[in-house]
Each structure stands twice: as structure tokens, then as C-alpha cells.
Amino acid sequence: MALTEEDIFCLKSVVPSTVKARFDPNLTFGQQTAEEKSMATLYLERKVPALRKAEKHWAALSLLARTAHTLQATKVRKVRRQALVRLLAKERRTERLHNMDEEMRDARSGPAADNLVFFLEHRRTRAGLS
């Protein structure tokens, strides 16, 4: 099968967009419906006629399978990375709160803390009550 540079350039954009448009991103290539696979295959073969020469559509099907796998793996890596970032942020926040609590242990009780709590709750100072 002889693909031209123009065919390759076209395939680099058409295959991923076809997979995203046609396939359910939560399913593997093998789990996609036969109708969706056939429509995607025929679309690719219509866009790049050189793919039609392959026996039993293996060229288009292999491109679709590889791209579907790559997109799904990228999605999984992104989700894992986001979960790790959230976990690290939570750990950093917990550590910062612990450090602040250690520094402010003696300041929690006392007239300054009581006056600030009163002001934040009532939007006025205790002196303003008189």
C-alpha cells in the first residue's frame, strides 16, 4: 500500500477526529459496536482511497484501534495525574494547617482572639456596644 505525504498528513488529523466523533470514549476498540466501527472505517477509506486496497479493511481498522487505544490511555493518565495533584494539595494543606496550629497554640485563647471572634460575628467591636 502506497500512501502519499498528503494521505499521511490527512490521516493524522482525520483518524483522531473520527475516533472522537464515532466511538464511546469509555469503551475499548473491541467493545465499540460493529456499526460504529464500519462507519468510521468507511469514512476513513473515503477520505484516503489508498486505504481501500488493504484486505478486509485492516489498514483503516488498525489505525482506528491504535488511535482509540492512545486516546483512552491519555485520558486515564490525565485522570490519574489529576488525582495525584489533588492528593498532594490536600497533604500540603494539612501540613500548613498543622504548622499554623502549632504556631498559634497560645494565641487561641485570650482577649485578642475573643475580640476578633466577636467582631467577625457581629461586625462591630465590644466597645461599640456601650
Image (cartoon, rainbow, N blue to C red):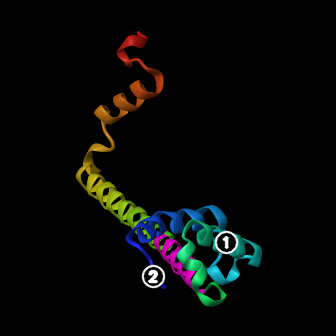
Confirm whether the magenta stretch covers residue 49: no
Q: Mark 2 or mark 1: which comes first in sequence?
A: 2
Residue 123 x, y percent position in the rendering? 43, 20
Residue occupied by mark 1: 42
Q: Quadrant of residue 64?
A: bottom right
Q: Quadrant of residue 36?
A: bottom right
Residue 41 x, y percent position in the rendering? 64, 74
The range drawn in magenta is: 58-74
> What count of labels does the image hold?
2
Helix, strand or loop under label 2: loop
Say if 3 sits above or below 18 in the image. below
Confirm whether the magenta stretch covers residue 70: yes
Considering depth in this image, is 18 or 80 the residue closer to the camera? Answer: 18
Residue occupied by mark 2: 2
Locate the C terminus by quadrant.
top left
Q: Quadrant of residue 88?
A: bottom left
**Residue 96 seen in this snapshot:** yes
